[in-house]
Image (cartoon, rainbow, N blue to C red):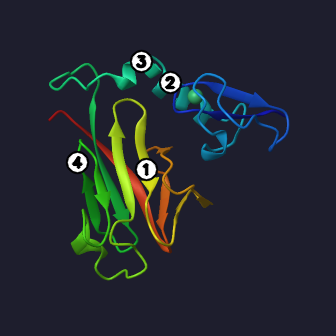
Amino acid sequence: MAFCKVCTCGEKIVFERPLSYPEKCPSCGRRLVDFMTYVEDDPRVEELLKNTSGTTEEEKDKKPVFGETSSVKKQYYLKLINGSMIPIPDEGCIIGRTETGAEELAEFPSVSRQHLRVTPRRNIGVLVEDISTYGTLVDGQRIVKNTPVRVVDGSKITLCDLETVLMAKEGND
Ligand SMILES: [Zn+2]
């Protein structure tokens, strides 16, 4: 059984033992510890690769083209354990008790005033970056502060001890 990680750049890195992956992505140099480890034949891997294909480093550095309609637009939300939904604007935002979601997060004092930077990226999901005091988990794994990590529809994002789920709704405007 082999394992693999899928880097934000679309590179699939395969390795034999769960922890035997290289420190950095061979194509872009991102730290691989930031990405989920999957069993190589996990169907989610195919899905991730599909979502990253066609997105190269060069393309990502270009300015986004507004009005482009080639792919279905997704509206992302962070759903809290109490059912509240925090909509994430296309241009990204900071989630926190004095930022986006201030009202929904008011009753959760463990969440930082500025907790998580969230940036939707066309076709590849959403990048999240922990900027908090007490940390953030993605699918149960603590993420490295100030380092963007890619998440997708259904990812569990725990703000300190507050469980949330990233949700996407498809729409045309
Ligand atoms: Zn990479």
Q: Nearer the viewer, residue 145 or 160?
A: 145
Circle 2 Cα neighbour tier, 10 Å, few/some/many (<14 / 14–19 / ≥20): few
Q: Earlier in the sequence, mark 3 or mark 2?
A: 2
- Indicate which label's residue lies in the foreground, 4 or 2: 4
Q: Secondary structure at mark 3?
A: helix
Q: Secondary structure at mark 1?
A: strand
Q: Quadrant of residue 17?
A: top right
Instruction: Identify the residue position indicated by label 3 in the image.
Output: 58
- Position in image of residue 83 (x %, y %): 33, 69
Instruction: Identify the residue position indicated by label 4 in the image.
Output: 89
Tell me the number on the disc at residue 128: 1
Instruction: Identify the residue position indicated by label 2 in the image.
Output: 50
Q: Quadrant of residue 59?
A: top left
Q: Earlier in the sequence, mark 1 or mark 2?
A: 2
The response on whether ligand 1 sits within 8 Å of label 4 is no
Separation (CA) of disc 1 from disc 2: 20 Å
Residue type (three-letter) at the residue carrying disc 2: Lys
Q: Earlier in the sequence, mark 1 or mark 3?
A: 3
- Position in image of residue 147 (x %, y %): 51, 48
- Position in image of residue 12 (x %, y %): 64, 26
Circle 4 Cα neighbour tier, 10 Å, few/some/many (<14 / 14–19 / ≥20): some
